[in-house]
Amino acid sequence: MKIAWFSPLPPKKSGIADFSSNVIPYLRNVSELSLFVEDYLPLESLAKGCSVISYVQKNKIDWEVGEKLKDYDLVFFNFSNDFRFHSYAYELLMQFPGIIILHDYVLQFFYAGYYLIEKRRFTGYVEKFKELYSLNLLSAQSLNEGPSAILNFLKKIYEDQSILQYPMNEEIVLKSSGVIAHSSFALEKIKASFPMKPAFKLDLPYTLSEEKVLLKTKDISFKSFAGNSKKKVIVATFGYVLPNKAYESVFKVLQSSSFLQQNVEYWIIGGTFFWYNIHSLIKKYQIKSVVKVFDYQQPDQVIELLSKVDVCIALRAPTMGETSSSLLNMMIMGKPVVVLNVGWYAELPDECVIKIDPCRVEKQLQEVLLETFERPLELKEMGSRAREYVLSYHTPSRYVQQLIECASRINLKSSKEEMKPLV
């Protein structure tokens, strides 16, 4: 069986690259695997035993590569909300269909980045929005404002949480031969909008090395903080840092409690475009001594940092139908994690994560952090249950087995015609 795999790969700094690096060894075991990348070389250890095909040369797609996709049994396009890693794959998909692995349900920010930054043609976003929703996004007067009008619109639908009404995933779903989603939340929405499109839900795998996790967690025990004034609770948020990770809510909670300021250290770990916003808010809430900010970390560094963390926070407000490998990484490390009771996070077992009401975020988050000092053993037990759950349902080997099964069913449902460019 020949498989074509489109994805960013290490050394690119991307959660999708980390995801692919964990599933590729298992794909390689069951197929003749070709890794399709842009104009760079993936890590040699990852590419071993695979064909590496660059489909971008000097910022241009080699369209002959697309013509050769008909020689593959399965063609996968990994797709997320980050235009930096998927713009060329998007253009190729528009001409040569394949199965999309939809890592984010909402693709608004992909299209915004694609048209405003990649193509420098903000009217392209306006035209695409009208094409998808038959709505004039901007008035003639607003158009004169240029790209800022688009950014203001995105800010509005982001803040009022209406962004799920305009996911802008329709074009990609329609052009695909089938869809792999990672949550029931996303799958149900896709099936409601595209009842004839083959679509399946798979459990997203963790992206850390299980062997290294086992070595690191073997002798780690949850600290007992009660009555120990010399130890601070380390609370952390991991993964790409967008404003919807609700770090401002954490800042407010820390500011409101002198006890937490004295006894908690909050780490923010992950790449972002929003450093200025984060540091401005830290200054605003006067918690510089409490917050420590890191950049993107490689998986091995994530293991090292997670081993030192006591409680994790993985809030998404608003949720955009995403799943979170960073959350799974926290869980496999045996960490208790606080999530909002929405979307995919609500689908996780109640006994494995701490779920809080999205309408009472700050109040309940403060309660959870204060209780950390009173019930460390309960939290340790929750972390152990979380770990067992992830090892049972979210392994890369299980993911690949189910991926091949579902993809084969998609191929059976899809047209039997020879693959050819779409008109």
Image: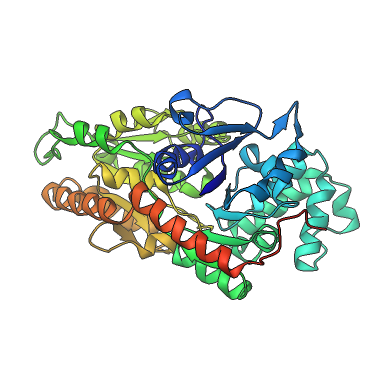
Examine the rendered structure and indicate whether residue 289 appears above or below residue 407.
above
Tell me if I can see residue 240 in this picture: no
Colour mapping used in the image: rainbow
Examine the rendered structure and indicate whether residue 44 appears above or below residue 416.
above
Tell me if I can see residue 299 in this picture: yes
Q: Is 291 or 184 nearer to us in this picture?
A: 184
Task: Look at the image and tell me in which quarter the C terminus lies.
Answer: bottom right
Q: Is 139 or 14 nearer to us in this picture?
A: 14
The percent coordinates of residue 382 (x first, y second) are 19, 53
Q: Horizontal placement of 385 versus 121: left or right?
A: left
Measuring 56% from the left and 58% from the top, which residue is drawn there? 105
Q: Quadrant of residue 118?
A: top right
Measuring 78% from the left and 51% from the top, which residue is drawn there? 125
Q: Residue furthest toward the left? A: 227
The percent coordinates of residue 145 (x first, y second) are 84, 46
Q: Horizontal placement of 313 versus 409: left or right?
A: left
Q: What is the total number of numbered labels drawn onto the structure image? A: 0
Q: Is 256 or 312 nearer to us in this picture?
A: 312
Q: Horizontal placement of 2 versus 220: left or right?
A: right
Q: Is 207 or 266 nearer to us in this picture?
A: 207
Examine the rendered structure and indicate whether residue 232 appears above or below residue 250.
above
Q: Horizontal placement of 259 versus 63: left or right?
A: left
Q: Quadrant of residue 86?
A: top right
The percent coordinates of residue 203 (x first, y second) are 39, 57
Measuring 43% from the left and 26% from the top, which residue is drawn there? 45
The percent coordinates of residue 81 (x first, y second) are 60, 48
